[in-house]
Image: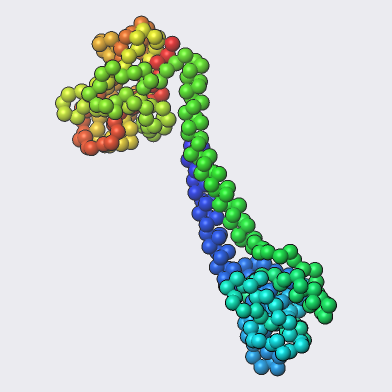
Amino acid sequence: MLANAVFTVGVVLVVAGVAGWIVAGFLNRGGSGGAVPQPGEIWWATVPYRDGEGEKRRPALVLGGDGRSYTILKITSQDKRDRHDHLEIPTRTWDRRATYNSFLDLSAPFQLNRLDFANRAGVVDPATWQRVARQHRVGMPVPAGPRSSPVRVLSTLAFVAGLLALCAGTVIPWVDRFSDEVKTAAAGDMPLHDAGVTASDRGESGRAYDSTLNGVHFTDSTGFWVGCEGRPSAVTFALDGRFKRFTGTAGLDAVAPKDVVVKLVVEVDGRTAATVTVSRTASAPVELDVTSARTLTLSALRTKGTCANATRPYGAVGDALLRQ
């Protein structure tokens, strides 16, 4: 069914979107998530010490690069106010948790390869970038603000598409039902459950249900309870002489036990008009002349099998219509 397929696709897309966001978050914490360092950005990177003995993971300002090799200036948290070759920069522009400023080493750029970069921290402030550009060759800076990774963008699109599909999968059955009702009204026909119940020994008999009878799905059925204690269960509808024919497919819904067999008697104005035997694996068409009839009664009795508790009627007449 189209609605079920659309709903399933929606669930898959929503789950994929959520999973993608989780993966993107993991990549942003532990790696670059596919992003490429750009001029003016501050990245956490593995930067060697000036004397070449060892290295340290620290923030670094990207001056430029070609995708493989990058020129950077290292950033330190140590107080370098007394050094003319260091520039104090506002840390909170790229690290909101910071409580103090950092210092950018202007003296000597370092060359790093792509694998030396871990994850992006943010973008340097414009004043600092102008000062750096006066002393070093730099590339064109990227706009300030966070950049979304491709994984996160695709995950967002999948999540939104999934939500739309879920909504569509939920709405389609209602649209189908409305369309069926419009067609029925235009043709002058009426579902049996809309005819009005004048008598019933079970309150749920005669109501509209969505049912599956002998493997065939009916979105608009009229349900009827089955008598399991040796006495039929009956429901009577008011026709008031308005209709000429009654049509439908009688059977037992999937809620009925598999071994139950039921005799269904259809009465028109108190007289037997049709008798059919139905089960989970056997349904029966019903077509009767109800011209000028005042009432129609469905009377159902178990003849084989064992009944069990149920929250809805065992029996149903799929596409039960009163035709003018």
Q: Position of residue 285 (x, y in %)?
A: 37, 21
Work out which residue is located at the far top of the displayed protein and give it: 292
Q: Is residue 116 left or right of residue 265?
A: right
Which corner quadrant of the image does residue 136 belong to?
bottom right
Q: Is residue 49 left or right of residue 311?
A: right
Q: Position of residue 259 (x, y in %)?
A: 25, 35
Q: Is residue 133 left or right of residue 75?
A: right
Which corner quadrant of the image does residue 234 belong to?
top left
In the image, residue 31 above or below residue 84: above
In the image, residue 22 above or below residue 58: above
Q: Is residue 115 visible?
A: no
Residue drawn at 66 percent across, 80 percent down? 102
In the image, residue 259 above or below residue 163: above
Residue drawn at 33 percent across, 36 percent down? 254
Work out which residue is located at the far left of the displayed protein and give it: 230
Q: Nearer the viewer, residue 205 or 130?
A: 130
Q: Position of residue 131 (x, y in %)?
A: 79, 77
Q: Nearer the viewer, residue 263 or 270?
A: 270
Q: Position of residue 261 (x, y in %)?
A: 25, 29
Q: Is residue 38 visible?
A: yes
Q: Is residue 307 left or right of residue 120?
A: left
Q: Nearer the viewer, residue 15 or 2?
A: 15
Residue drawn at 43 percent across, 11 percent down? 324
